[in-house]
Image (tube, rainbow, N blue to C red):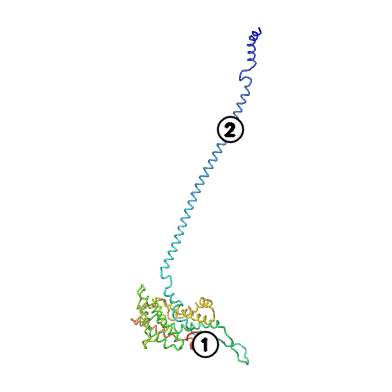
């Protein structure tokens, strides 16, 4: 009975249990909608985040692409800059190269360089024997050691005593005197011999006859023979190797120098003197007359200063400083200007181009130039006679270090 009762009541309980338990979805409907709304909000936030991320990524990509473009432009600009610099270097290199080529052209142009022979003949190492003589300086210093007292002193009962003068002071006064004397006595003969080498013997004999100082005469003859020796031993072997054919004037000068080697055997010919033989040597090397005169005058001053160094008047650096001074240059150029005005001293071998050889007696022009050269020779004369006295008394000194 109990069992049946239990079975009978089971449907009722089941139904009650079914009634008491709500069906799925009932009683929790509100919670589901809320959950759905929350999901939607979450999805919105995520979509916003995704949108922001996509926007940020797009901006990053845009900036990256822009930077890449700018880097490409920068590389292009750098490449262009390097190209411009290369072009500039090439242009500068071409300009430098052109300058170097211009310099080479200047070196090839013989007109822009001094004559090679001029540099050789102006060198003090040329064996002309000039430095064996003091050109009167040693005697001048010996006789000028004492100078008279100033004339503006008050008269006294005692005899005025001479005062000692500095050798350097005497040297400074001797240089212009000696140069003026040299140009007055020998420069007209030098110019005439250069312009008319065919008349060399008559010009040389004129100088030999008018040279009264025996000391100067011995020195002039010794140096004249040295010039002939320099020609025969140094320049004569190369005279035939000159590329340009020599003019008649140069040929005549070369022939005259060659003939002077045997002049000592012929008593009728005067031995060569230095001022008249010196220009023939320069003429054979096509050195202009103006350069010849300048070297002649400057060599005279070099000889004096060299003698002063050996005499202990001054040192070698001081002597070269005097040579390099504007005063010495002014002395030389002043003497040249004096004779340019008097005789129309010009430049070079072209001076006697009328008839190719002035003074040869070829036609009326040659005769006119011969007369002009004779006039020039007659202009030579000693303007400072006391220099001849000082030079002549050199061999009378008690002691001396230079040749007389």
Residue reaching furthest to the top: 1
72 versus 30 height, above or below: below
Mark 1 to mark 2 CA distance (whole Å): 127 Å
Camera-near label (1 vs 2) is 1
Q: How busy is the neighbourhood of tag 1: few (under 14 within 10 Å), some, or many (20 plus)?
A: few
The image quadrant that residue 29 belongs to is top right
Q: How many marks?
A: 2
Judging depth in this view, the residue of 275 and 401 nearest the camera is 401
Which quadrant does the N terminus fall into?
top right
Residue at the extreme right of the image, as rendered: 2
User: Where in the figure is residue 246, as x and y percent of width and height?
Assistant: 35, 75
Side of 308 relative to 154 (left or right):
left
Q: Position of residue 79 (x, y in %)?
A: 48, 51
- Please provide percent x and percent y for residue 102: 43, 65
Q: Residue furthest bottom?
A: 157
Residue under numbered circle 1: 399
Quadrant in the picture for residue 356? bottom left
Residue 342 x %, y %: 44, 81
Secondary structure of residue under mark 1: loop
Which label belongs to residue 46? 2
Nearer the observer, 3 or 317: 3
On screen, residue 165 versus residue 250, left or right, reads right
Quarter where residue 37 is shown: top right
Disc 2: CA contacts within 10 A as few (<14), some (14-19) or many (>=20): few
The mark nearer the N terminus, 1 or 2, is 2
Q: Is residue 391 visible?
A: yes
Q: Relative to 104, is 211 above or below?
A: below
User: Which residue appears at 52% of the width and 87% of the height?
Assistant: 399
Task: Provide the secondary structure element on which disc 2 rests.
Answer: helix
Tell me, yes or no, if residue 191 can be seen here. no
């Amino acid at each position: 009975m109990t069992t049946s009762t239990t079975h009978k009541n089971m449907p009722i309980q089941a139904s009650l249990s079914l009634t008491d338990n709500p069906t799925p979805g009932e009683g929790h409907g509100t919670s589901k909608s809320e959950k759905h709304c929350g999901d939607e909000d979450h999805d919105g936030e995520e979509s916003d985040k995704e949108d922001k991320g996509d926007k940020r990524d797009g901006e990053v990509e845009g900036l990256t692409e822009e930077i890449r473009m700018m880097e490409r432009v920068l590389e292009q600009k750098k490449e262009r800059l390097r190209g411009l610099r290369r072009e500039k270097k090439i242009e500068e290199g071409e300009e430098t190269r052109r300058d170097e080529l211009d310099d080479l052209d200047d070196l090839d142009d013989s007109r822009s360089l001094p004559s090679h022979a001029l540099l050789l003949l102006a060198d003090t190492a040329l064996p002309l024997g000039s430095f064996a003589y003091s050109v009167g300086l040693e005697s001048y210093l010996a006789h000028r050691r004492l100078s008279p007292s100033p004339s503006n002193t008050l008269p006294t009962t005692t005899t005025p005593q001479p005062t000692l003068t500095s050798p350097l002071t005497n040297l400074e006064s001797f240089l212009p005197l000696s140069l003026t004397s040299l140009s007055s006595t020998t420069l007209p003969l030098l110019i005439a011999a250069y312009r008319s080498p065919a008349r060399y013997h008559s010009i040389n004999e004129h100088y030999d006859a008018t040279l009264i100082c025996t000391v100067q005469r011995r020195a002039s003859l010794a140096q004249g023979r040295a010039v002939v020796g320099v020609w025969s031993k140094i320049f004569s072997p190369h005279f035939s190797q000159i590329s340009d054919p020599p003019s008649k004037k140069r040929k005549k000068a070369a022939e005259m120098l060659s003939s002077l080697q045997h002049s000592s055997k012929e008593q009728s010919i005067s031995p060569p003197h230095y001022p008249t033989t010196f220009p023939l040597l320069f003429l054979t090397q096509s050195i202009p007359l103006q350069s010849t005169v300048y070297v002649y005058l400057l060599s005279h001053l070099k000889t004096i200063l060299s003698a002063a160094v050996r005499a202990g008047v001054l040192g070698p650096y001081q002597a070269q400083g005097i040579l390099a001074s504007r005063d010495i240059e002014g002395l030389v150029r002043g003497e040249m200007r004096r004779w340019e005005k008097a005789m129309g001293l010009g430049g070079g071998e072209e001076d006697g181009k009328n008839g190719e050889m002035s003074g040869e007696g070829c036609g009326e022009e040659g005769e006119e130039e011969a007369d002009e050269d004779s006039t020039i020779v007659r202009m030579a004369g000693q303007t400072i006679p006391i220099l001849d006295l000082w030079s002549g008394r050199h061999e009378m000194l008690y002691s001396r270090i230079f040749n007389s």
